[in-house]
Amino acid sequence: MYPENFRYTKEHEWVKVEGGTATIGITLHAQGELGDIVYVDLPKVGTKVEQGKTFGSVESVKAVSDIYSPVSGEVSSINEALNTTPEKLNADPHGEAWLIQVKLSIPTEVDGLMKAADYQAYLGA
């Protein structure tokens, strides 16, 4: 259910690191708690993000929730498709509905995040 090659935060974001780039999204659990997603607010390319700080928000029919960055760096890409089809987050939160990509400034931050088994145990706690 939760990809083994991702790392997870207690705020229900995931990160997948390939080389010096981190792809960030929200977890299956997060989208389930939010319900039907109707809008996503993402930063512009070039924006600096900091681990643990908000970089955007997700709006659902239930609530607006902040999105926290699991890593620090500079936004190198955003998922433009979510501007017109934010509901993709409900359908494929660990795949096509990634939020942003970040050029890592402190790659070792990833080591402090939860692995899939730890995240699933956290959800069950």
Image (cartoon, helix red, strand yellow):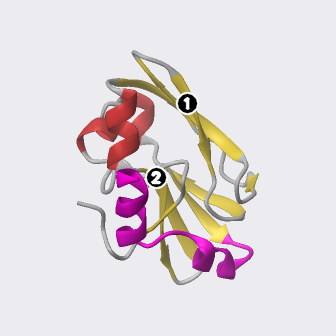
Dot 2 or dot 1, earlier in sequence: 2
Magenta stretch: includes residue 90: no
Q: Is residue 28 above or below residue 1?
A: above
Q: Residue at x 75, y 57 (%)?
A: 50
| 93 with respect to 20 (left or right) | left
> Badge 2 is on which residue?
25
| 4 with respect to 41 (left or right) | left
Magenta stretch: includes residue 115: yes
Amino acid type, label 1: Ser
Measured as percent of width and height from the top left, residue 31 is found at 36, 38
Measured as percent of width and height from the top left, residue 97 is found at 36, 47
Q: Is residue 73 above or below residue 12?
A: below
Name the residue nearer the viewer: 26 or 45: 26
Instruction: Give the prevailing secondary structure in the magenta stretch.
Output: helix
Quadrant of res 101: bottom right
Q: Where does the magenta region start and end?
A: 104-125
| 26 with respect to 87 (left or right) | right
| Residue 65, disc | 1
Q: Helix, strand, or loop for circle 1?
A: strand
Q: Is residue 26 above or below residue 84?
A: below
Q: Residue at x 56, y 56 (%)?
A: 77
Amino acid type, label 2: Gly
Residue closest to the far top: 61
Measured as percent of width and height from the top left, residue 69 is found at 63, 54
Name the residue nearer the viewer: 112 or 82: 112
Q: Helix, strand, or loop for circle 2?
A: strand
Q: Is residue 21 above or below residue 57?
A: below
